[in-house]
């Protein structure tokens, strides 16, 4: 979608398997917090494309009346505690939510999704420490697309793989292929089960690829041909292939799915376009 | 001689104290080093011990009451026969040791 | 025949007022959790939480590592998830480490999610200079007054410490509760009828006719001392204890200044973009022809060296000189 009114967006293209694989491991009682790269995760968590599109375009039909946008979208009733656009800013919040679940003895888990960009932050260290110390039901998911705006992760981060960050705290830590949704789901399921059973926190690193530049307003820093080559690793195409080879999906099934997707996207865009913008006076609502 | 037991001024950073408990009763004789009273400051307990023997004659601030630093808590004398003045004002202070915990 | 029970007043330490308020609220609402450094068995850095650990246990009264960003974040997350939290940040200087979750998340939560998420928490912190050096002495409440979505309160005595803490805990959004190191040695009366003190309401600590002095926190005591000395020279001062910095009770200030015609604002923080600057401008917007002066700290870091510290901080003498200047130019 290339419209002039689409705003400042961070796309999840290439990183869909991480969002979908992690969400497939969650129950409706669990809560997902994300970074500013929230569109894929929000959809994977079950927010409708129409409501997400409305929120992205700043319309009142969005879950936050268009005020949050991609950077802060939230719908806790759907298990989507929400995005926070400060890199690493949702980590300590996630720990607080997990502590609440722990104190209330809820059999629910909190997942915090963040990128490699957050792995240099003190907030991650502090949160890992608390999660380990207090056995919080918190799953750290690092969607490592190996680049933070223009900085490759090997130039920003000393540990490798990033799952090593959790090891000093004694937390179970796994690194998986983030382009393989089934692998992500399996690893996430294992760590979520552990957290739910009271075994405490875990760390899942998913190695993914960012198919576009950091944002719709950011220039691409990588070589054009390298970026183009990434598309051959498309996680959606990979899953299609797997299902076809397994005999779980044939060409009719595939066409039906693709038609469904096109239709949902069309509906979402029309819905959002037809929805109203907020009145300017809403700028002062709900402040205190 | 008649003395006043006053709230020690040497305790760091204190304005008012609360009297917690008197360790002696009126008429009791005490010796040097005996615990007289426990005070509470905003952050610590203070044990006031006698710096010399004397007799406790009158308690001015009972348990639970408050007094400011430097002001009198009780009147004491060397022996029980000395008659007491009306106020503790201008009485020499009894030497004390105190321990903050 | 009416039965009037005479309310009994009890003298207590400033720290006891805080402990009492928190204890009562923890009984009233079992979702309330206290977290911070040394809040558990130690009873709080200023002994302001004594008794809570024994009464409510380690789950609800939790010691944290020295990590203000995650301490505040924890409190915000707890509150956003439906519990209530008090986060104790020992020194206001360290609040800066926790400003991201407080300002970027908590203060914006209700607005940004259109009410889907709110963060009713209290961040309690202690300001002020008392011989502890440049990074343990600051009064930066003016910075936080400007954050939309954040309430800021500051008691000057045990009764208000109690009442404002109760109100802060019961608020439906984030509240920054700021006390002062120099308040802890003081004792004050708390009646058994005492209850929550509303946020956004100032109090007149001393009535007067010639000048209005606004102050908050420890500076209220400095203002009262100056007022006493000024009275001996025939100047009658009205002292307003702000109690709330955000929302600010500008109506109470304006009402007073409309009568006195002169205003001197007092704060221990910096004058630049300070509380006095805000009050002065808001008063000028509403009343013409008022003489105004501001008294605050000198524009320098505050050393632990007592000579240097004293040279920087406002005191009763500086305040009364300022009052005299303001009145002499009438």
Image (cartoon, coloured by chain):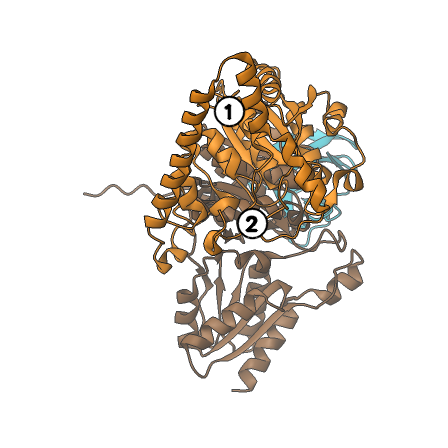
Chain colours: A orange, B cyan, C brown
Q: Disc 1 marks which residue?
A: A101
Relative to C222, is A60 above or below? Answer: above
Q: Classify 10 Å Cα crowding around label 1: few (below 14), some (14-19), many (20 and above).
A: many
Pick whichever, A27 or A221, lies toward us. Answer: A221
Q: Classify 10 Å Cα crowding around label 2: few (below 14), some (14-19), many (20 and above).
A: some
- Residue at 52% from the left image edge and 35% from the top image edge: A40
- Residue at 65% from the left image edge and 66% from the top image edge: C315
User: In the rendering, at what x and y percent does residue C318 appear?
Assistant: 65, 72
Numbered label attached to residue A16: none
Q: Can the viewer see residue A256?
A: yes
Marks 2 and 1, Cα distance to the nearest angstrom? 24 Å
Q: Secondary structure at mark 1?
A: helix
Relative to B69, is C28 above or below? Answer: above
User: In the rendering, at what x and y percent does residue A172 appear?
Assistant: 69, 19
Relative horizontal placement of residue A26, taking residue A120 as reference (left or right):
left
In which quarter of the view is residue B27 placed?
top right
Q: Disc 2 marks which residue?
A: C103
Q: Residue furthest front?
A: A251
User: In the rendering, at what x and y percent does residue A39 appear?
Assistant: 51, 39
User: In the rendering, at what x and y percent does residue C191 appear?
Assistant: 43, 43
Relative horizontal placement of residue B36, taking residue C28 as reference (left or right):
right
Q: Can the viewer see residue B64?
A: no
Q: Secondary structure at mark 2?
A: helix
Relative to B8, is C260 above or below? Answer: below
Pick whichever, A67 or A195, lies toward us. Answer: A67
In which quarter of the view is residue A197 placed?
top right
Relative horizontal placement of residue C305, taking residue C192 as reference (left or right):
right
């Amino acid at each position: 979608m290339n419209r002039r009114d689409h705003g400042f967006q961070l796309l999840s293209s290439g990183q869909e398997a991480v969002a979908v694989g992690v969400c497939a491991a969650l129950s409706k009682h669990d809560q997902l917090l994300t970074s500013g790269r929230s569109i894929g995760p929000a959809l994977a968590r079950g927010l409708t494309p129409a409501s997400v599109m409305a929120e992205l375009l700043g319309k009142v039909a969005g879950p936050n009346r268009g005020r949050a946008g991609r950077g802060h979208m939230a719908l806790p009733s759907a298990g989507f505690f929400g995005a926070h656009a400060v890199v690493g800013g949702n980590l300590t919040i996630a720990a607080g939510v997990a502590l609440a679940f722990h104190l209330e003895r809820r059999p629910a888990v909190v997942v915090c999704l963040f990128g490699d960009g957050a792995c240099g932050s003190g907030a991650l260290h502090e949160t890992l420490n608390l999660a380990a110390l207090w056995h919080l039901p918190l799953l750290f998911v690092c969607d490592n697309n190996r680049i933070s705006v223009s900085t490759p992760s090997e130039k920003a981060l000393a540990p490798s793989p990033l799952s090593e960050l959790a090891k000093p705290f004694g937390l179970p830590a796994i690194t998986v292929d983030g382009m393989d949704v089934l692998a992500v789901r399996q690893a996430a399921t294992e760590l979520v089960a552990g957290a739910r059973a009271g075994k405490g926190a875990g760390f899942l690193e998913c190695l993914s690829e960012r198919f576009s530049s950091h944002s719709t307003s950011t220039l691409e820093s990588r070589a054009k041909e390298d970026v183009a080559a990434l598309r051959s690793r498309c996680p959606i195409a990979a899953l299609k292939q797997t299902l076809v080879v397994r005999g779980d999906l044939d060409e009719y099934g595939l066409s039906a799915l693709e038609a469904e997707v096109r239709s949902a996207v069309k509906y979402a865009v029309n819905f959002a376009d037809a929805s109203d913008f907020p009145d300017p006076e809403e700028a002062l609502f709900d402040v205190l | 001689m008649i003395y006043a037991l006053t709230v020690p001024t040497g305790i760091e950073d204190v304005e008012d104290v609360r009297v917690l408990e008197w360790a002696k009763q009126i008429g009791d004789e005490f010796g040097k080093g005996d615990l007289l009273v426990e005070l509470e400051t905003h952050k610590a307990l203070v044990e006031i011990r006698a710096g010399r023997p004397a007799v406790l004659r009158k308690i001015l601030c009972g348990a639970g009451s408050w007094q400011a630093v430097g002001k009198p808590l009780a009147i004491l004398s060397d022996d029980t026969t000395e008659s007491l003045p009306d106020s503790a004002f201008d009485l020499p202070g009894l030497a004390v040791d105190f321990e903050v915990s | 025949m009416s039965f009037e029970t005479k309310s009994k007043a009890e003298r207590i330490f400033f720290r006891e007022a805080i402990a009492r308020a928190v204890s009562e609220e923890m009984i009233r609402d079992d979702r309330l959790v206290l977290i911070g450094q040394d809040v558990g068995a130690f009873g709080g850095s200023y002994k302001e939480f004594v008794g809570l650990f024994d009464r409510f246990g380690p789950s609800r009264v939790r010691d944290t590592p020295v990590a203000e960003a995650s301490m505040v974040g924890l409190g915000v997350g707890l509150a956003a998830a439906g519990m209530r939290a008090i986060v104790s940040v020992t020194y206001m200087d360290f609040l800066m480490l926790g400003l991201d979750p407080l300002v970027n998340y908590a203060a914006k939560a209700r607005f940004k999610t259109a009410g889907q998420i709110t963060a009713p928490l209290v961040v309690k912190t202690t300001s002020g200079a008392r011989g502890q050096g440049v990074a343990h002495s600051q009064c930066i409440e003016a910075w936080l007054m400007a954050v939309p979505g954040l309430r800021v309160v500051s008691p000057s005595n045990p009764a208000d410490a109690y009442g404002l803490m109760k109100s802060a805990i019961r608020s439906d959004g984030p509240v920054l509760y700021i006390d002062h190191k120099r308040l802890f040695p003081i004792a004050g009366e708390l009646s058994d009828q005492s209850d929550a003190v509303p946020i956004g309401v100032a109090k007149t600590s001393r009535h007067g006719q010639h000048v209005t002095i606004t102050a908050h926190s420890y500076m209220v005591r400095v203002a009262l001392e100056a007022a006493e000395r000024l009275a001996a020279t025939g100047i009658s001062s009205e002292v307003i204890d702000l109690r709330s910095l955000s929302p600010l009770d500008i109506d109470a200030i304006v009402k007073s200044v409309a009568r006195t015609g002169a205003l001197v604002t007092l704060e221990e923080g910096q004058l630049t973009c300070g509380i006095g600057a805000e009050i002065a401008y808001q008063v000028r917007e509403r009343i013409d022809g008022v003489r105004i002066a501001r008294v605050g700290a000198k524009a320098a870091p505050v050393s632990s060296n007592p000579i240097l510290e004293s040279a920087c901080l406002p005191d009763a003498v500086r305040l009364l000189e300022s009052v005299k200047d303001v009145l002499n130019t009438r």
